[in-house]
Image (cartoon, rainbow, N blue to C red):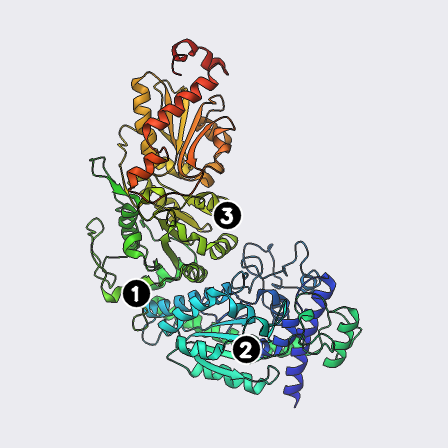
């Protein structure tokens, strides 16, 4: 009886803390925390394996709140269970991840209780969630990561990786398409360590979900290959415990627990209404709800005596004991398998193995053009041989994106430098019967692929995902979260421009470079040739806290003669001088990225024959360039040189920052067209002759605007 009373007291404390946080903030979502408190309590108190003293223990169970709007519930859990703060976002010294003051400052500046959960800011938040469905798809990545780590590193008597992944979701999550993508793949992969908990309260912002959502969710998930368990009453801890145990006992597939609940449970006038969803209850309704729970209706942020100790005696002690036992196991494992233990440590610390970049290829200007997707595939395979936790795949396009790992990954790898084109064997693919594979088939699921990649990165693996660049339209929400969480997800996008030709405007990205560059915190790199690709991978692999967007050509491009032109190592600076006037004082700057750099080089050589001094600047990464000191940027793009031509087979949007309003931009003002590549390029002016014409017009326009140009006025005035 005492145990039941403590259970109910803890559940109601979770509810009232959540209600009070929302009410004080005058903003938030109280309804779901009120109905889902028993569901979350039962999981955390009786099943979740998590050490509150070390929320980053690598074999902890993961709890993902996909219904991020219900975050007051998660913050209340973190506070009551005594989860400690850990990470660079916290000042030095011991403190709770979420203090009472944080709860009181819910949704206010500086509080650890932000409006939706933010990974990296609040310890115990496993992933940033929102939009709906993102947490579910990310949890699939976490589940895959555990399966891969277990298959790769566990040994007899050494179960270093055996944790489970839980995700709490709601009706909105189930409506989002990304959830279906992720659930389908999870069922195919038989991820039995994955449990989604569906808090079915049947309410969305517009009212009852009956107006939009009438499918049989359980039947859908059974069709996906999931085990489906139903709980008829969210307040029944016995039913909930039975459901969680059913998940633990299921070994062949993931589990969906469908929990029937009442949003705003206990609020007499707002229970089961949309009014309980996205706004504070109001003073009177809060008082009545607390009376229903049997708590003091006048108190605020009250933690009843015994609640914290109750959590510590169950959740806390269970997690601390499991962690201590794991540490002993890992110490013995380290003694017996020092190389594997070293890999695990490097992985967790986001360090790269020594000499990880040994043997990276150097490409010669031998006249044999090569696409940047092709050279990237060779570089990727070389690096993957030395970084065992570099893994990934494509949304059904790996043969086109050149992202298959084709070396032998079972311990008999070819020597660095001996990589040859080949087809991976079945043992190299991650599948339900082989969780050690490093190649992934994501299927035609671009959005879920990127969110799954986030889950892999959150588990400290080094994942890459790939597709055609135009399909970033389907991925932006997940990529945006990569940037917000500072995850080093590598996204590889090929078929990067209108030069892909015959497939036409539906497949030809135009606005996509501008869109990706507009996103804070992501590093976009569009290399000009094979050697820039090599340098791009050097930068990407060394970046531990920045997602990379590698944009690559389908068509073959020339390999620049680096004995004649600037070193490709300049890519690390974002922009660098490829070719210059002999005296270093150009009349015109030719700026480009990707395949258009070689067009500018061709134009430069013709201008040089005509006695016109030009400078070619490759600008593969605006983000890297903007991070350089102003002196360097001015050296590359001298402010005094106003005659500028930017060339890029994409939207002109944004180039004004480098050309100025009076500069010329050869780019796209429309969608592309369906025709052979050369025809498309010529139609839109992507050829040296057009660049030369624009350069001469720029010189004629700006000549005389500086003392440097005045000295050349006579010799150049005949250009027009």
* Circle 2 SS class: helix
Give x and y (percent) for residue 557: 28, 39
Give x and y (percent) for residue 238: 56, 87
Along the polypeptide, which appears first: circle 1 or circle 3?
1
Which mark, residue 437? 1
Which residue sits furthest top?
Answer: 714
Image: 658 above or below 217: above
Give x and y (percent) for residue 658: 48, 31
Nearer the viewer's eye, disc 3 or disc 2? Answer: 3
- The residue that label 3 is drawn on is 521
Image: 423 above or below 168: above
Give whichever of 518, 481 is nearer the camera: 518
Give whichever of 458, 368 is nearer the camera: 368
Quarter occupied by residue 36: bottom right
Quarter occupied by residue 431: bottom left
- The residue that label 2 is drawn on is 43
Q: Is residue 3 visible?
A: yes
């Amino acid at each position: 009886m005492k145990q039941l009373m403590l259970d109910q007291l803890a559940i109601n404390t979770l509810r009232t803390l959540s209600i009070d946080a929302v009410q004080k903030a005058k903003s938030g979502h109280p309804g779901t925390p009120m109905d889902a408190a028993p569901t979350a309590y039962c999981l955390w108190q009786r099943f979740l394996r998590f050490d509150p003293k070390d929320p980053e223990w690598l074999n902890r169970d993961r709890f993902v709140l996909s219904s991020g709007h219900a975050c007051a519930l998660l913050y209340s859990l973190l506070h009551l269970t005594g989860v400690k703060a850990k990470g660079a976002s916290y000042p030095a010294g011991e403190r709770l991840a979420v203090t009472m003051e944080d709860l009181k400052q819910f949704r206010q500046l500086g509080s650890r209780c932000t409006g939706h959960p933010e990974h990296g800011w609040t310890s115990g938040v496993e992933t940033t969630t929102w939009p709906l469905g993102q947490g579910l798809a990310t949890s699939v990545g976490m589940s895959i990561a555990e399966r891969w780590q277990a298959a790769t590193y566990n040994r007899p008597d050494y179960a270093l990786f055996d944790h489970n992944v839980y995700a709490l979701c709601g009706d909105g999550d189930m409506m989002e398409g990304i959830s279906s993508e992720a659930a389908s793949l999870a069922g195919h992969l038989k991820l039995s360590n994955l449990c989604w908990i569906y808090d079915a309260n049947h309410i969305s912002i517009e009212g009852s979900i009956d107006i939009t959502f009438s499918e049989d969710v359980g039947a859908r998930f059974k069709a996906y290959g999931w085990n489906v368990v139903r709980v008829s009453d969210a307040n029944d801890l016995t039913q909930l415990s039975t459901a969680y145990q059913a998940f633990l006992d299921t070994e062949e597939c993931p589990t969906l627990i469908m929990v029937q609940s009442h949003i705003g449970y206990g609020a007499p006038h707002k229970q089961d209404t949309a009014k309980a969803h996205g706004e504070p209850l109001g003073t009177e309704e809060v008082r009545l709800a607390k009376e229903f729970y049997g708590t003091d209706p006048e108190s605020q942020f009250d933690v009843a005596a015994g609640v914290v100790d109750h959590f510590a005696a169950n959740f806390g002690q269970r997690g601390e004991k499991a962690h201590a036992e794991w540490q002993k196991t890992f110490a013995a494992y380290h003694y017996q398998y020092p190389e594997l233990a070293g890999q695990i440590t490097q992985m967790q610390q986001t360090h790269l193995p020594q000499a990880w970049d040994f043997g990276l290829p150097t490409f010669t200007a031998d006249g044999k053009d090569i696409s940047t997707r092709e050279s990237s595939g060779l570089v990727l395979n070389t690096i993957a041989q030395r970084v065992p936790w570099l893994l990934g795949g494509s949304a059904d396009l790996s043969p086109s994106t050149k992202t298959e790992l084709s070396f032998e990954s079972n311990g008999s790898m070819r020597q660095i430098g001996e990589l040859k084109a080949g087809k991976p064997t079945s043992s190299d693919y991650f599948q339900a019967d082989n969780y050690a594979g490093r190649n992934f088939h994501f299927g035609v699921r671009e959005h879920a692929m990127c969110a799954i990649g986030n889950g892999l990165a959150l588990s400290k693996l080094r994942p890459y995902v790939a597709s055609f660049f135009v399909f970033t339209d389907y991925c932006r929400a997940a990529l945006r979260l990569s940037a917000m969480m500072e995850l080093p997800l590598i996204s590889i996008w090929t078929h990067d421009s209108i030069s892909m030709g015959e497939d036409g405007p539906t497949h030809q990205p135009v606005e996509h470079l501008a869109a990706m560059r507009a996103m804070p915190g992501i590093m976009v790199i569009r290399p000009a040739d094979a050697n820039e690709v090599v340098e791009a991978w050097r930068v990407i692999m060394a970046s531990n806290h920045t997602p990379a967007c590698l944009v690559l050509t389908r068509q073959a491009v020339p390999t620049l003669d680096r004995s004649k032109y600037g070193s490709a190592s300049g890519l690390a600076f974002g922009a660098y001088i490829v070719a210059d006037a002999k005296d270093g004082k150009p009349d015109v700057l030719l700026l480009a990225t990707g395949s258009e750099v070689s067009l500018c080089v061709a134009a430069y050589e013709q201008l040089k024959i005509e006695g016109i001094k030009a400078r070619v600047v490759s600008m593969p990464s605006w983000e890297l360039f903007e991070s350089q000191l102003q002196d360097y940027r001015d050296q590359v793009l001298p402010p005094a040189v106003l005659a500028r031509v930017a060339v890029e087979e994409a939207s002109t949007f944004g180039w004004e920052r480098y050309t100025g309003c009076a500069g010329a931009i050869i780019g796209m003002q429309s969608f592309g067209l369906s025709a052979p590549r050369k025809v498309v390029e010529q139609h839109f002016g992507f050829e040296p002759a057009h660049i030369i014409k624009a350069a001469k017009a720029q010189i004629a326009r700006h000549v005389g605007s500086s003392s440097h140009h005045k000295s050349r006025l006579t010799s150049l005035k005949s250009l027009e």
